[in-house]
Image (cartoon, rainbow, N blue to C red):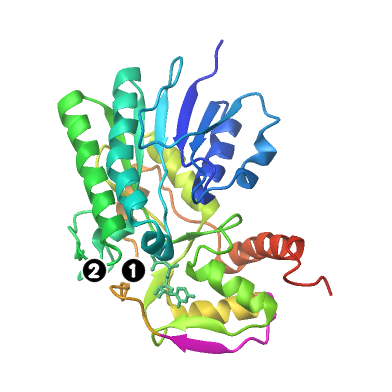
Amino acid sequence: MAKPRVLITGGAGFLGSHLCERWLAEGYEVICMDNLITGAVANVEHLFSNRDFHFEDRDVTEYIHVVGALEGVLHFASPASPIDYLELPIQTLKVGSLGTHKALGLAHAKKSRFLLASTSECYGDPLVHPQSEDYWGNVNPVGPRGVYDEAKRFAEAITMAYQRFHGVDTRIVRIFNTYGPRMRLNDGRVLPAFMPQALKGEALTVFGDGSQTRSFCYVDDLVEGIWRLYNSKELLPTNIGNPNEMTILEFAKAVIEITGSRSKLEFKTLPEDDPKVRQPDISKATRVLDGWEPKVPLHDGLTKALASFRERLLALGEISAH
Ligand code: UDP
């Protein structure tokens, strides 16, 4: 019997590549579509020998065509770090809006399930803490993050419209800060900034006074939550993340400890509209996803991420293997 097939847009990105692995492991044929502006073939190269894996270098904001049946479309294509939004503002807006429209159109035509990668950025700089799904957010539409936040809010709106008007079977995951192996070295997010700095003995660049908070989820916990959401009947947005909240200063210290580095801290200007706090309320996810909750402690997750950063920096000759 033919295996079920899914299309994963952004499949060569950090999260996308982990999703490709999981869906293959669950017995699926996976079509990974990516235009590689922030994704990388290196993230999925190890899957090329798997006959159930197919890679297509394609821009999902253009018309997308897939031959044959599709059980699901997982729309994960998007630049996803604050410096990417500054460098790729139009592409960020296009993939969240036009790309989501194209991916939904395909799901509608193929009668596929559709899962949208949304974000905690929908809550903006939140006035409610922790953030639960019924909070509508505090987003600056014209600030530097507006291109991402508003595109994702539009993406949620059009996903709900396709569900209500066309009857497409949709899911929406609001993803909170996630980390793990294969984060792009130069993507500017806090872990890909701190870990190489710590490994090279350079100062860790803490933005502002480091009192802003984030809550970091290891990628395997996130993927488990997304797998369960895909297989659930939950049609409204669902937060997936780790509620273990800490200040960026505490996070910097955790990175220094895990790397055994002697790096100091260097305080830099806080970027505009940088959210002051962020912590997911995951009570809904735990309720509707069969008791799902994150399992990987920060120390274990950072140890796994460290191996990935170290390996790549060694290959680039940026650190030595003393
Ligand atoms: N941050 C930092 N130093 C860096 C990069 C980021 O202090 O070199 C801070 C950033 O200001 C934010 C937090 O770390 O408060 C998380 O930033 P990231 O870009 O990872 O994602 P965000 O949660 O802001 O989308």
In the image, 14: left or right of 162? right
Q: What's the amino acid at mark 2? A: Pro
**Mark 1 CB near ligand 1 (8 Å cut):** yes
Q: Quadrant of ligand 1?
A: bottom left
Q: Residue at x 42, y 65 (%)?
A: 83
Across and down, in percent, residue 263 comes to 63, 86
C-alpha separation, residue under disc 1 versus residue under disc 2: 7 Å
Q: Which residue is mark 1?
A: 278
Across and down, in percent, residue 265 comes to 54, 88
Q: Residues within 10 Å of mark 1 (few under 14, many from 20)?
A: many
Q: Magenta segment range?
A: 259-268
Q: Residue at x 23, y 50 (%)?
A: 153
Q: Quadrant of residue 124?
A: bottom left
Q: Residue at x 24, y 37 (%)?
A: 159
Element type where label 2 sits in the image: loop
Residue contact between numbered discs 1 and 2, judged by CB atoms under 8 Å: yes
In the image, farthest residue toward the top: 1
The number of numbered discs placed on residues in the rendered structure image is 2
- Mark sitting on residue 126: 2
